[in-house]
Image: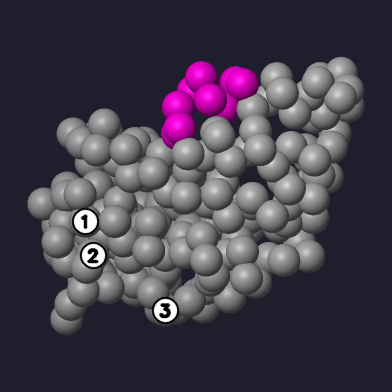
């Protein structure tokens, strides 16, 4: 169940309809990020602070992911239609929301296996994404870092991430499916998400 009224959802949807471009970063009153667009629709305030009506987990995930994914996904009909529902996810189901995010994270990390193989730490990466634990992530970091100090590995990892997110971004983001993850996050509290968004 949404923490918003139908009128509030319509305010957000109206703002989105009048402003066809969502941007990375907070943006402006004319082209805002996803969370700032929600705030502009609700209160007219340009801020990426997560509103009290919205899950902190969902809000933080949106902020991080929407800044990195391609603009055609961020500005897709499907993503934009889910934002009024995302705004009403509330704070009462954070553990369920976190479980969805963590599952998506591990699935997304698995997509980078070919890159890990090319960089020389494929076996460690494979063990990490299979185990899906904090301990396996620590072990993968320690094993992959064995060939260099932590700073050098961090630089290598940053380069690898940049390589994956830039050179192969279209295929990566299609397979990562952030719209599907947002749909699952909202569906924790609102079944309308599975239909794509609020219906007229």
**Along the line of sight, which residue is nearer the eye, 59 or 179?**
179
User: Which residue is depicted at the point 85% across and 34% down?
Assistant: 155
Q: Earlier in the sequence, mark 1 or mark 2?
A: 1
Do we see residue 135 in this rendering? yes
Identify the residue position indicated by label 3 in the image: 77
Which residue is located at x 27 percent, y 33 percent? Answer: 94
Q: Horizontal placement of 153 versus 40: left or right?
A: right
Label 3 near label 2: C-beta < 8 Å? no
CA gap between label 1 and label 3 equals 18 Å
Where on the picture, by quarter, is residue 12? bottom left
Residue 105 lies, in percent from the top left, at 48, 44
Q: Quadrant of the C terminus?
A: bottom left
Tell me the magenta residue range: 131-139
Residue on which the image places disc 1: 187
How many marks overall?
3
Q: Please tell me whether mark 1 sits on a helix, a strand or a loop.
A: helix
The colour style of the image is one colour
In the displayed structure image, the side of residue 158 where residue 108 appears, left or right: left
Q: Main secondary structure of the magenta part?
A: helix
Of tags 1 and 3, which is closer to the observer?
1
Label 2 neighbour load within 10 Å: few <14, some 14-19, many 20+: many
Marks 2 and 1: in contact by CB < 8 Å? Answer: yes
* Residue 49 placement, left or right of 165: left
Q: Residue furthest front?
A: 123
- Give the numbered dot on residue 193: 2
């Amino acid at each position: 169940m949404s923490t918003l009224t139908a009128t509030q959802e319509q305010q957000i949807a109206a703002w989105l309809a009048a402003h066809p471009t969502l941007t990375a970063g907070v943006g402006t009153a004319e082209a805002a990020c996803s969370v700032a667009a929600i705030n502009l629709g609700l209160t007219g305030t340009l801020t990426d602070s997560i509103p009290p009506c919205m899950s902190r987990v969902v809000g933080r995930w949106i902020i991080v992911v929407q800044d990195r994914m391609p603009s055609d996904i961020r500005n897709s009909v499907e993503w934009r239609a889910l934002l009024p529902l995302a705004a009403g996810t509330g704070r009462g189901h954070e553990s369920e929301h976190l479980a969805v995010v963590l599952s998506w994270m591990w699935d997304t990390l698995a997509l980078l296996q070919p890159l890990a193989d090319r960089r020389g730490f494929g076996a460690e990466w494979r063990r990490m994404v299979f185990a899906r634990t904090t301990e396996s992530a620590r072990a993968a970091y320690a094993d992959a870092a064995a060939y260099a100090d932590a700073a050098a590995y961090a630089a290598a990892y940053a380069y690898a991430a940049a390589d994956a997110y830039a050179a192969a971004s279209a295929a990566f983001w299609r397979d990562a499916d952030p719209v599907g993850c947002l749909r699952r996050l909202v569906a924790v509290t609102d079944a309308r998400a599975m239909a794509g968004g609020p219906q007229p």
